[in-house]
Amino acid sequence: MEDRFNRRYGYPWVLLNEEPFTDEFKRRVQVVTNAPVHFGQIPHDHWYQPDWIDEERATEGRTRMMNQGIIYAGIASVFPHIVEPDVKFFCDLDYDPFKFMEENDKIYGFTISLVEWVQTIPTLWQTVKDFIVSNSQLVHPQNAMGFLSDDEGDSYNLCHYWSNFEIADMDFWRGETYQKFFDFLESTGGFYYERWGDAPIHSIAVSLFARKDQVHFFRDIGYRHDFFQHCPSGDEWREGSSINFAGKMMTPTRYIVLALAVIISLHYIVSFSNENYGRATSLSNIKDTIGSKLSNTGPPYKNGVPDDYYLKDQHTSPQGRKANATFVILARNGDLNGVISSMKQMEDRFNKKFNYPYVFLNEQPFDDKFKKRVSEITDSKIEFGLIPKEHWYQPDWIDEKRATAAREKMVKDNVIYGGSVPYRNMCRFNSGFFFRHELLQNYQYYWRVEPDVKFFCDIDYDPFLIMQDQNKMYGFTLSLYEYEATIPTLWNAVREFTKANPEYLAPDNAMAFLSDDGGETYNRCHFWSNFEIGNLDLWRGEAYTKFFNFLDEKGGFYYERWGDAPVHSIGAALFARKDQIHFFNDIGYRHEPFQHCPQGAAHKKGKCWCDESQNFDYEWYSCLNRYDKLFN
């Protein structure tokens, strides 16, 4: 929500709980926003089951629902931190929905509508009908009864707006009409004797007591909760893909996005009754009163949000300059969803502010769907490249019999990717060929991005300029030990090369990161190359070119399973100075199963959403301590 919308508008957050929030909870949520955050405790009488509820009857109802397999049927209360977590907002929201609601006289906004489970509300509609019979003057003449009922109110079609997302005018709920309606429903005990939810109750209320044009479908807000999602399509998808920075507009605090706060809902305090206490009262005598009188001009949301609500383009670099750099993504068409996830995070955390281009590489042509989807995520330049066959596929001179035997042994020994030829192709390509691709020839720096990775923190500076201005050659976030079974002869090949070519070794290099005995043996430490920010001139240089060609001739990418991570790491550690290798401590990053989560001030400054306690930096399998010792 901060990334998609609130960072530009600064609306406050209200988090509610029936128990006091812990200091750790407060600290973590305050880190991710600059907006005011308020923590409230729910009054006891607003949360717990009232004393007047017949507990024997309520228990019987819960038991029956549990036997029917109805979700939440047996829950008498829930903890607020499990209410509405893990929802997703897919699209940039470059206008102010609050301002839109206010200036267009909207009462209620939604993204998803669906049918309620009839078992949870067997008597709700009869209760609504009872209320309307006694209070027909409260029903708005231009209401949305047609959304709720297919027979002018005699029966309920179970349609409701899914209230885990709602943008609403609080004065509607505070008003006399809704208060009277809720009190009437509450008095029947249906929240506990059955399992009435806030979603149908809110939906029925706004449909009956507001004009139908005051209910707005936010079709341009991409949203997912649990099993269901709304994904904008067509023009609104494209409009929601980019972000711009401009002035903030504030509206009265009577408007609130319930999806912005952890809202505690009576929806999940449930029970069920087998008592048939509804009475069969028809609404036929008030159909004329509640019938809609608005002309049928189609849903108002079809007109979209006017352009003057949107922020204007303003791509700027804080330094007023940029490096000659690009993102590099190696992917296949089948990786599309993972690519979209990684790319969207990169745009949100960094690239919307800096607008660096992307280069996509694939050994097969990218299809039109792939190109269209990734192009919708960014305003930056995108190029799609086809990898030459000789750069990707296993060379003809490899002894296939020997390579097959090696793969079979690794499979037997349960070595990850041990039997995969495509994985070996990828490792060899990343080790020695990606930087030779024609699309990269005009760039000096690159940032490697893989599908399905996470970027936890806002990056409000330009890492490429850090690399350029401080003469860095290689940047990383994670370092760890390589699987010994994948590289049994790699270090022997490295030693053979360095003994024959000592002139290529950089003075004050990082050999101590690789070896604990001056280079006699390899301690298997490497920088995890699924994240790397590098100077392409390092790989293009004579030293690394000769080094890679030497390794390639050994056949270890196929006779063993040499990875680009140890090969790049060894190359950077030997052919660059140790101070030219940079640990990006402030870039929070995860590639399964490891993650780097910035600590302390860096965590707060980056508004990181990772848990600081979940940090790989100094775990037993991490090599960061060896990197640190280079500078002690």
Image (cartoon, helix red, strand yellow):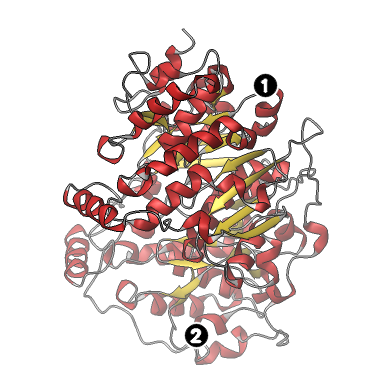
Query: Can you say whether 239 is above or below 418 in the image?
Result: below
Which residue is located at x 65 percent, y 64 percent?
107
Which residue is located at x 50 percent, y 46 percent?
430
The spot of residue 282 in percent (x, y) is 44, 89
| Mark 2 Cα-neighbour bin, 10 Å: few <14, some 14–19, many ≥20 | some
Instruction: Answer with mark 2 or mark 1, whichever residue precedes in sequence.
Output: 2
Task: Please state which of residues 16 and 71 is positioned toward the viewer in this rendering.
Answer: 71
Query: Can you say whether 607 is above or below 263 in the image?
Result: above
Instruction: Give residue 149's mark.
Output: 2
The spot of residue 142 in percent (x, y) is 67, 80
Q: Secondary structure at mark 1?
A: loop
Task: Please state which of residues 187 and 572 is positioned toward the viewer in this rendering.
Answer: 572
The spot of residue 90 in percent (x, y) is 56, 58
Cβ atoms under marks 2 and 1 closer than 8 Å: no
Instruction: Give residue 589's mark.
Output: none
Q: CA distance from mark 2 to mark 1?
A: 68 Å
| Callout 2 amino acid | Ser
Report the side of 345 relative to 302 (left or right).
left
Q: Secondary structure at mark 2?
A: loop
| Callout 1 amino acid | Gln
The total number of labels drawn is 2
Residue under label 1: 470
Report the side of 345 relative to 266 (left or right).
right
Task: Please state which of residues 115 and 454 is positioned toward the viewer in this rendering.
Answer: 454
Query: Can you say whether 541 is above or below 59 in the image?
Result: above
Which residue is located at x 47 percent, y 54 percent?
87
